[in-house]
Amino acid sequence: MRLASFETARGASFGLVEGEALRDLGALPGRPWADLRACIGAGGLAEAAARAAEAPLVALSDVRFLPVIPNPARILCVGINYASHIAETGRETPEKPMLFVRFPSSQVGHGQPMLRPAESERFDFEGELAVIVGHGGRRIPQSEALAAVAGYACYNDGSIRDWQRHSSQFTAGKNFPATGAFGPWMTTTDDIPDPAALNLITRLNGAVVQEAPISDLVFDVPALIAYCSTFTPLEPGDVIITGTTGGVGAFRTPPLWMKSGDVVEVEIDGIGTLSNPVADEG
């Protein structure tokens, strides 16, 4: 099933996607879960599916999409994790995952503008697979890692490249407001038993700029969950962004930067297409 977080005139909610509409699970009698993160944390996904018919239908065209998990405790991002991206950067293959963090305020939902800040014109796209943790813990072994996943989504890890390179740490270039996008929804693991079988495509103004199978990850989903859960206890609703493939704008000749008026899409088969316009920050 597909679950989205959204906002209407009545406020923020979440729901189960049914074609061009969704069931507003936040409007169920008694409001059993405050949001999607709370539903996942309470082990409520099966109950949400069972009770969906009780929830009112809302047209997708009538909602404002929020990031799939608007309020995660952790957004752990992986850099330099596809062989093609490693090759274009000229780096050595890392021996351990290269991690950085994003703040929730740095991301927007499907259909919302990704904002190029006034401080830079070097706004780059990075299509990625997002992993949403279903149940947490410390030291989750790789053999059990996929069972700890609630679902998967598309992510655009928009990067302000010059700020990213101010130091060896990526944080500054990854956390300008509204530079990342997360959506349009989460597809649960019953529909995606093996994320490595998926394929990722990024388009800028309709032209394909990135394409790769998820199986090309250097550190796959189980390896990332095992590694991250070693140094921090993962919690339900935490998000792991797995890295981007080759073709980013910074390593093209000439460089290809996102600008106001552009439309950028990240499509992963079996999940959907995350689409965002690009605008200059006001």
Image (cartoon, grey):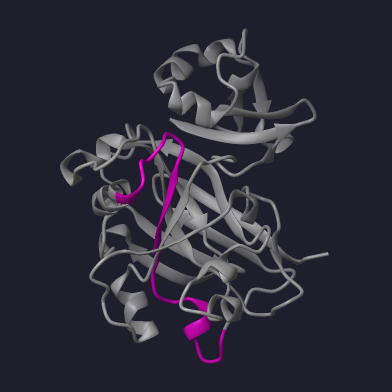
Q: Give residue 201's position: percent from left, percent from top.
A: 44, 62
The front one of 153 and 227 is 227
Farthest residue to the left: give it. Answer: 143
State the quadrant of the N terminus.
top left
Q: Quadrant of residue 279?
A: bottom right
Is residue 264 in view? yes
Tell whether position 250 is magenta. yes
Q: Is residue 166 above or below residue 156?
A: below
Q: Give residue 118's position: percent from left, percent from top.
A: 77, 74
Q: Quadrant of residue 260?
A: bottom right
Q: Which residues are magenta?
A: 231-255
Q: Give residue 215's position: percent from left, percent from top.
A: 26, 59
State the quadrant of the C terminus.
bottom right
For residue 112, side relative to residue 133 (left or right): right
**Predominant secondary structure, magenta span:** loop
For residue 38, side relative to residue 135 (left or right): right
Q: Is residue 228 above or below residue 249?
A: above
Is residue 17 in view? no
Q: Which residue: 62% across, 21% down?
A: 26
Q: Is residue 24 above or below residue 200?
A: above
Q: Give residue 22's position: percent from left, percent from top.
A: 59, 27
Q: Which residue: 39% across, 75% down?
A: 246
Q: Total of numbered circles in the picture?
A: 0
Tell whether position 73 is magenta. no
Farthest residue to the bottom: give it. Answer: 253
The front one of 231 and 221 is 231
Farthest residue to the front: give it. Answer: 231
Farthest residue to the right: give it. Answer: 282
